[in-house]
Image (cartoon, rainbow, N blue to C red):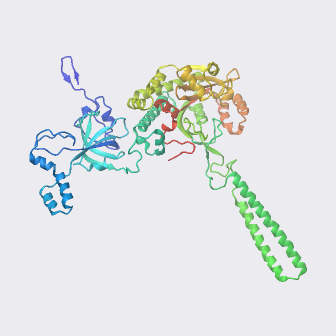
Amino acid sequence: MSTSEEGVQTVVALPTLPQSKYSKRVLLKSILTRSDQGLGLVGESVVIGGWVKTSKELAKDPPTTTTSTSMTTIDSPPTKDVTCVEIFQSRIPLFRSIFKVLNGSHSPRRRRFDSIVPVKPVPYVVYLQVNDGSCVPCLQVVLDSSVAPIGQFSPTGTSILVEGVLRQPSTSGKHSIELEVKKIVHVGTVGTAKYPFAKTRLTLDTLRSYSHLRPRTITVASITRIRSSLAQATHMFFQSHGIIYIHTPIITCVDSEGSSEKFQVTTILGKEVGKDESNSVDDTGAANLEAIKSAYKEKSNKIEELKRSESNKEALIIALQDLQKVNELALQMEAREKSKPRNSSKDGKSDFFHRQMYLTVSAQFHLESYACAVGSVYTFGPTFHAEKSQSTKHLAESWMVEVEIAFADIEDIIECAEDYAKFLCHWVSENCLEDMKFVSKRIGKNTVDQLQLVASSSFEKITYKEAVDLLNKITDKTFEAKVEWGSALTDEHERYLADEILKRTIIIYNYPKEVKPFFVRVNDDGKTVAAFDVVVPKVGKIIRGGQREERAEMLSARIKEFSLPREDYQWYLDLRRHGTVKHSGFSLGFDQLVLFATGLDDIRDIIPFPRTVGNANL
């Protein structure tokens, strides 16, 4: 409602209810997240679907002689005087129990009494808190026992699709609107004996054991919506800046990170034995063949002796038969040895791709080839690391956003990374209000403030040398790893800089060339490289990047310096030989970003199906 200058009240029209095109239902988000909390929809007939979070059953009062249609609970006091007959009727269950005790269950008197006063079932109503995954709040759904048996609707986790009328709540509480059910379209019952969420609230640690069911919790559903929104924002940012989306391969022979722990892709697993077993089997087979050949030689010599003596023809015949059997066995074993698959773990020539292939750890090299042709590109997909780490920040399968921009130096790419990080933090704080309020209440109180701080303040830029000097000035803190020039900064070092010393998001750049990959451009001092990392408070490093080495002779020298097989990087060197340009890029750990946005501590809680060492439930 609004009032004009003439004092006339007018109704402000709110958006009507949109129906989901492909499921023909109304999302609860369109009802409950309106500015009027749905009050402007009273009287609307809608179809909603969702899952029961909690339920409460109440019995209606027995009908009275008045025409009032109001209902109270069974514990409510009477609203008017009652007659003796009404009192007698209300005591019928008590009289029936007395007759049953005195006369037995087959008493004729009981049958006559029942025939005189028939007993009607007590009417009930159930209040269901239903959520469909589109928003944090639940809709209160009211189901009367006259519409359907309410027992099957009450268990937590029950799915319902119902048609009803929106109305103001019939009972006082936190809800502004509720749905009175008129028709049941579908109900999916729950086996309460085995349903893990039926009784108590489970911890996030326990929920990981039920990765197929945990999205039904409000917390995980909220994290999922935040993750989805950040993914949407990622594409919006790059597309708006003319950066092209590229699909890069998951199966590759390229390892841009130089990691020794990779997942190998093979089709011959189980078709041939492992290296050690193969060697032992080959050795055993060769030894048996040599023993048979030796036996064949001995039997041949014995036959020659029998022939010379001519004393025992029967023994000669038997010896000739044995020699023939040994010869056949030797031929069979030779054929078997020749047909055995040889171990191809080194060259992979007998495998599907005829060489060793792995699940990708980074798409950077493939992006570089496209950046040198179409300008600026990005990709968004899974990467794989086989380190057997139990860290709360490590996943075997994680998601990464990677960017490559042609004709860009380190200053350009740092500016892009900073703008991108700020855009994401601003986006999620503005477009996920309900979910951010929920995670702030349940997980981290300062989560929204931290996001807004990153979005609104400039990042502190310091060189690697300045970072080492700042850490070495700390006297009241002992780090697990020693801080000195030439050593890599650990997660502990980086977080201490962001959390305790500078108290903001920082960019560390110009690292020693020994601690960064071979493809990063060497600076003019010959000691450092044009690499940078973005470190946010509480989480640590979320972005790493730098300017790529575009000089073919320098890149070739770096490959030799790292003792890498030159033949594997000929195509990478070709990019420098044929129309080379300076270009830069970065990668953002998307899971680390979601971790920062939600305030959680364990990365396994923000990915739908976490894969870690020894754990892959689905």
Q: Is residue 357 visible?
A: yes
Number of numbered discs: 0
Q: Picture coordinates of residue 462 (x, y %)? A: 59, 19
The reply, left or right, for residue 216 in relation to residue 4 is right
Q: Quarter of the image holding residue 304?
A: bottom right
The reply, left or right, for residue 419 in relation to residue 545 is left
Outermost residue to the right: 308
Name the residue located 23 percent from the left edge and 25 percent from the top edge.
1
Q: Picture coordinates of residue 381 (x, y %)? A: 53, 38
Q: Is residue 404 visible?
A: no
Of residues 178 and 530, the one nearer the viewer is: 178
Q: Quarter of the image holding residue 306?
A: bottom right
Work out whether 197 lies above or below 329: above
Work out whether 160 lies above or below 292: above
Q: Picture coordinates of residue 358 (x, y %)? A: 62, 43
Of residues 366 and 229, the one nearer the viewer is: 229
Q: Picture coordinates of residue 512 (x, y %)? A: 67, 25
Name the residue located 50 percent from the left edge and 24 percent from the top edge.
419
The reply, left or right, for residue 90 in relation to residue 356 is left
Outermost residue to the front: 102
